[in-house]
Amino acid sequence: SKNEYKLLQILMRQHGQIVSRSRLLRDLWQDERFVDDNTLTVNVNRLRKKIEEAGLKDYIQTKVGQGYIVP
């Protein structure tokens, strides 16, 4: 999806750095005030599944209480 692509772009640009959930929510859904926090989780999980199907396991890592990172 468009948001999954944008999510991957953001994480790859910040390679090796933790990107906070709040930043991802802001960058992906700039004008939508009522986006549920779970929407981000769903998008991350869908993207992870596609990346794993391509052979890259654990490419996007969760840092509990901090955000996500592509190491």
Image: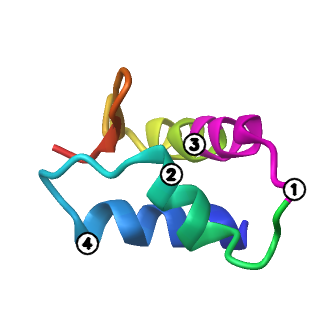
- Mark identifier at residue 18: none
- Could you tell me which secondary element the residue under label 3 belongs to? helix
Decide if residue 48 is on the left or right side of residue 16.
right
Q: Which residue is mark 2?
A: 22
Tell me residue 58's x, y (percent): 32, 29
- Whether residue 5 is visible, yes or no, is no
Chief secondary structure of the magenta span?
Answer: helix
Residue 33 picture quarter: bottom right
Check disc 4 and give the amino acid type.
Arg
- Could you tell me which secondary element the residue under label 1 belongs to? loop
Question: Given contact means CB atoms under 8 Å apart, are the residues at marks 3 and 2 in contact?
Answer: no
Q: Which residue is mark 4?
A: 13
Q: Which residue is mark 1?
A: 34
Q: Earlier in the sequence, mark 1 or mark 2?
A: 2
- Mark identifier at residue 44: 3
Q: Between residues 14 and 5, which one lies in front from this camera angle?
A: 14
Q: Which residue ends up furthest to the front in the rendered image?
A: 33
The answer to whether residue 42 is magenta is yes
Region of the chain picked out in magenta, as a range: 34-45
Check disc 2 and give the amino acid type.
Ser
Find the distance from the CA under tag 2 to the CA under tag 4.
17 Å
Q: Quadrant of the N terminus?
A: bottom right
Find the distance from the CA under tag 3 to the CA under tag 2.
14 Å
Give the class, few, some or many, for how many residues have Cα within 10 Å of label 4's Cα (few <14, many ≥20).
few
- Could you tell me which secondary element the residue under label 4 belongs to? helix
